[in-house]
Amino acid sequence: KSKKETQRIISDWAEENIDNLPKTVISGDKTIKSTNYELQKTFEYFVKKNLIPFYPEDRSIGRVRESIYRFFENEFKMKYEEVQNEIIKIALSDKNVQHFVNVIDLSKEEYKNEVIKRQSEIEYQKDWNIPESISYTSDYVEQKGKKSILQPFYTDGKWKPENAFIEYLNKSEKIEWWFKNGDRDATFFAVPYNDSGDKPFYVDFIVKFKNGQIGLFDTKSGMTLKIAGPKIDGLSEYINNENKKGNKLFGGIVTNTDSKDFKGRWVYFDKQSKELKNDDFSNWATLEM
């Protein structure tokens, strides 16, 4: 099943508002002194802090960061691949930082109003199927995905856990195909979860096994337990309810015990979120492929 909703995600508004930020309000202040690593972490923390309480996960943080980079490229011809640190210094300087706080805050207000407006319009779509085709932006490139149900397979390649999991799936002799899910509207698959109201949880992967089982997996990346908890419980409840109807589903949050190089065990968590502990995989199940 897919849960249909017409609302966009928080980073959509942030992208639009950052794009519309007047060029004239930004001054070329580069006085911040930090190492490259410290700058990146400071910038990430700035975006995350200002997105709270709306989904401060890696995806949203990344999209907002990219919007700021793109603003500087479009308005000042500063390509972030070449002068990324200078952009961060200018954006976070005392003279400029409030402008970016303002547009992100405005985005949160617009998003909140849209959520309230659309709550009554959310509805279930029965008999969801994998789409026959998907349109991609120019940011996506073709990648080898021999067991992807959609061919050719395109990806933006941004998320290392997802890329590593795809490699693991492609090597498996136990699966027929996998589908890399999207994260919006009824085109893609979502399960309901409750976090101050019903919301859709778009799992990252749908996997069809040769024994007839369907796996629903979401790569654990950048999720705090507080954020992941309701989604974990929603997915667990959905799987349990569907299996009572005779379906053969399993899955949960999936990760590798080696979060740096992904050379450890692939494991998944299929219990309630209250049993989840940071950096403790003792009650996770090994995902045998």
Image (cartoon, rainbow, N blue to C red):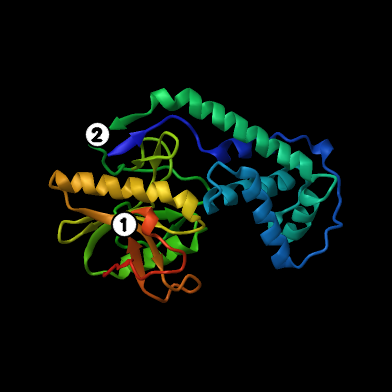
Closest to the observer, 121 or 206: 121
Q: The residue under label 1 is which amino acid type?
A: Lys
Assign a secondary structure to mark 2. Answer: loop
Q: Using the numbered discs, state the Cα–Cα distance from disc 1 to disc 2 in whole angstroms.
A: 26 Å
Between discs 1 and 2, the one toward the N terminus: 2
Picture coordinates of residue 88, whole percent (x, y): 75, 54
Q: The residue under label 2 is which amino acid type?
A: Lys
Q: Where 48 sits versus 1, above or below? A: below
Picture coordinates of residue 10, whole percent (x, y): 55, 38
Residue 77 relative to residue 163: left or right:
right
* Residue 65 visible from this viewpoint: no
Residue 274 relative to residue 48: left or right:
left
Task: Tell how many labels.
Answer: 2
Picture coordinates of residue 277, whole percent (x, y): 43, 63
Q: Which residue occupies 39% across, 47% down?
A: 231
Mark 2 surroundings within 10 Å by alpha-carbon count, few (fewer than 14), some (14 through 19), many (20 or more): few
Q: Give the residue at the far bottom of this rendering.
A: 263
Where is mark 1, residue-wise?
A: 271
- Which quadrant holds residue 178? bottom left
Where is mark 2, residue-wise?
A: 126
Q: Where 63 sits versus 222, above or below? A: above
Q: Which residue occupies 76% across, 52% down?
A: 78
Picture coordinates of residue 56, whole percent (x, y): 56, 48
Q: Which residue occupies 17% across, 52% down?
A: 248
Is the C terminus in the top left, top right, bottom left or bottom right quadrant?
bottom left
Assign a secondary structure to mark 1. Answer: loop
Q: Give the residue at the far left of this rendering.
A: 246
